[in-house]
Image (tube, grey):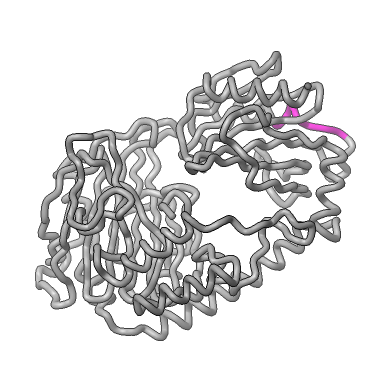
């Protein structure tokens, strides 16, 4: 799956003071290679190249190894199998969307949710002599030290960060996302960083894309290591290989709907803020048992906390079905119009907010609601959400107007609209984007509706047309 499927958003990184690393070249790094080494067969078969005569075309690239390596082969074989496999049937009454019959790591990390899938995955893993991850620990903003402690490393990227987060596996493979915000919410000064380090011998489910119009060159960093630099449609990519890992880094300036082009000098300066020598020394091909133990421990702690949270969030209901019955009976069972071609509902969930989250006004939130996810066969999708807000835990008085007004204040760069006569607000990019949304206040149903197209910047005209069809379906 792609980066966008695994991560809700890219959290970026700021240009900052360049570390004065040692100029001594360690013995741990290898030839950085080039981007064509990582092409996936969905775009190019072995021996073929990127068609640079078609600048609109995008190529899929592996983040887990070069073409021909065991890690690369395992990824290609497993993703090809998943593309051709039938989706498990979750329609039976005793099954829910979260149902799976395999070990957690098989289901959550590899989409091997059935015994049949797990057997195929085991065959692929054995044939390519790679290992599966067994634990994935998450670190949120302010918790970057968890990653450094697990890897037993000092900070390897210099600079000032507004947001940092990610996750790491039991073998030390890790994802790091960081961001520096601009001076204002709608500024183009944001800098975003995405980094994935894939330990050799392990199997990670992750890939990315590159445009076919790119520039590439080798650069000697101040840390003493050679890296492969790529300018890709305004963004920058860094590829680096050590004896024990493949490292991919992508950097972007500005928000997705207003990207600025990174220059060669920009990308080289950014590469010099990363201590590749330290990464080469840490990912030297040797096992690191302490990292494994720390990742497993933290993963088990987080899984237990998640279970406790699920139980707490279910209150005051005794089951999900009881909560569903309560909310659908109270709000209605509104769905995306079936007439729209190509979309089908893949997931429906209800929620009951009882002061355990904050509303758009920054106060404790009390609401009932429904969220539905719709997808097309080619991976496009959207969320439809409807919600009734209350002024207090007693749920005696609704507060839809108050929350809707707070939404417009939270997103002052939005645009006022009407959807079938109802007051609406178009937001070009949500804070947890990159994607757009349209909200409207349905006074007849006493609900606030929202429509979000996943991972995309969508015009107000497109969202408005879709919203009108939803309103017609609701009122029909």
**How many numbered marks, from 0 up?**
0
Q: Is residue 262 left or right of residue 473?
A: left
Q: Is residue 174 above or below residue 388?
A: below
Point 24% across, 67% down: residue? 68
Q: Residue furthest top?
A: 421
Q: Which quadrant of the structure image shows residue 303?
A: bottom right
Q: Residue at x 62, y 42 (%)?
A: 373
From the top left corner, tell me how far across and down residue 417 is, in percent: 60, 17
Residue 402 appears in the rendering: yes
In the image, residue 337 lies at what x, y percent?
68, 29
Place residue 174 in its image quadrant: bottom left
- Residue 400: within the magenta? yes
Q: Which stretch did the figure color magenta? A: 397-403
Depth check: 291 or 162 in front? 291
Q: Residue at x 13, y 67 (%)?
A: 31
Q: Is residue 148 above or below residue 216?
A: below
Which of 165/182 is in front? 165
Q: Report the front residue among 182 and 174.
A: 174
Q: In this picture, is 141 found above or below 348?
A: below
Left or right of 160 in this view: 45: left
Quarter of the image with the N terminus is: bottom left
The quarter in which the C terminus is drawn is top right
Residue 423 rendering spot, x and y as whole percentages: 68, 18
Q: Residue at x 28, y 34 (%)?
A: 56
The image quadrant that residue 470 belongs to is top right
Q: Is residue 457 magenta?
A: no
Left or right of residue 62, residue 375 in this image: right
Image spot of residue 20 (x, y percent): 16, 63
In the image, 205: left or right of 321? Answer: left
Camera sees residue 14: no
């Amino acid at each position: 799956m792609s980066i966008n499927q695994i991560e809700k958003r890219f959290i970026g990184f700021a240009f900052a003071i360049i570390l004065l690393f040692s100029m001594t070249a360690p013995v741990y790094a290898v030839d950085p290679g080039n981007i064509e080494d990582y092409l996936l067969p969905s775009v190019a078969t072995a021996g073929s190249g990127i068609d640079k005569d078609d600048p609109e075309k995008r190529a899929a690239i592996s983040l887990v190894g070069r073409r021909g390596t065991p890690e690369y082969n395992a990824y290609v074989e497993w993703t090809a199998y998943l593309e051709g496999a039938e989706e498990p049937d979750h329609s039976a009454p005793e099954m829910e969307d979260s149902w799976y019959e395999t070990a957690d790591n098989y289901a959550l990390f590899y989409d091997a949710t059935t015994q049949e899938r797990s057997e195929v995955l085991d065959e692929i893993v054995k044939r390519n002599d790679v290992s599966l991850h067994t634990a994935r620990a998450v670190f949120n903003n302010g918790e970057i030290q968890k990653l450094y402690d697990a890897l037993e490393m000092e900070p390897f990227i210099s600079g000032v960060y507004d947001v940092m987060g990610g996750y790491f596996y039991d073998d030390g493979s890790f994802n790091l996302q960081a961001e520096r915000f601009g001076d204002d919410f709608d500024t183009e000064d944001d800098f975003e960083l995405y980094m994935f380090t894939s330990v050799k011998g392990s199997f990670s489910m992750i890939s990315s894309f590159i445009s076919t119009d790119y520039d590439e060159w080798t650069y000697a960093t101040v840390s003493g290591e050679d890296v492969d630099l790529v300018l890709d449609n305004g963004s920058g990519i860094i590829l680096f290989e050590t004896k024990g890992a493949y490292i991919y880094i992508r950097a972007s300036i500005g928000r997705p709907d207003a990207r600025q082009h990174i220059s060669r000098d920009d990308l080289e300066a950014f590469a010099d803020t990363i201590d590749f020598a330290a990464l080469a020394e840490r990912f030297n091909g040797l096992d690191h048992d302490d990292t494994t133990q720390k990742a497993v421990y933290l993963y088990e702690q987080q899984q237990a906390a998640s279970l406790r949270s699920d139980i707490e969030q279910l209150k005051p209901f005794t089951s999900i079905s009881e909560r569903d019955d309560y909310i659908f009976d109270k709000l209605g069972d509104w769905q995306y119009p079936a007439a729209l071609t190509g979309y089908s509902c893949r997931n429906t969930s209800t929620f009951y907010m009882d002061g355990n989250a904050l509303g758009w006004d920054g106060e404790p939130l009390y609401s009932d609601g429904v969220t539905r996810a719709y997808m097309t066969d080619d991976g496009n999708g959207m969320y439809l959400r409807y919600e009734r807000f209350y002024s207090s835990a007693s749920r005696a008085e609704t507060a839809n107007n108050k929350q809707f007004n707070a939404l417009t204040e939270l997103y002052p760069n939005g645009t006022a609209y009407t959807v079938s006569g109802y007051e609406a607000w178009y937001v070009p990019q949500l804070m947890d984007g990159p994607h757009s949304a349209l909200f409207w206040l349905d006074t007849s149903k006493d609900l606030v509706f929202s429509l979000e197209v996943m991972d995309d910047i969508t015009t107000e005209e497109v969202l408005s047309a879709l919203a009108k069809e939803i309103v017609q379906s609701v009122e029909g």
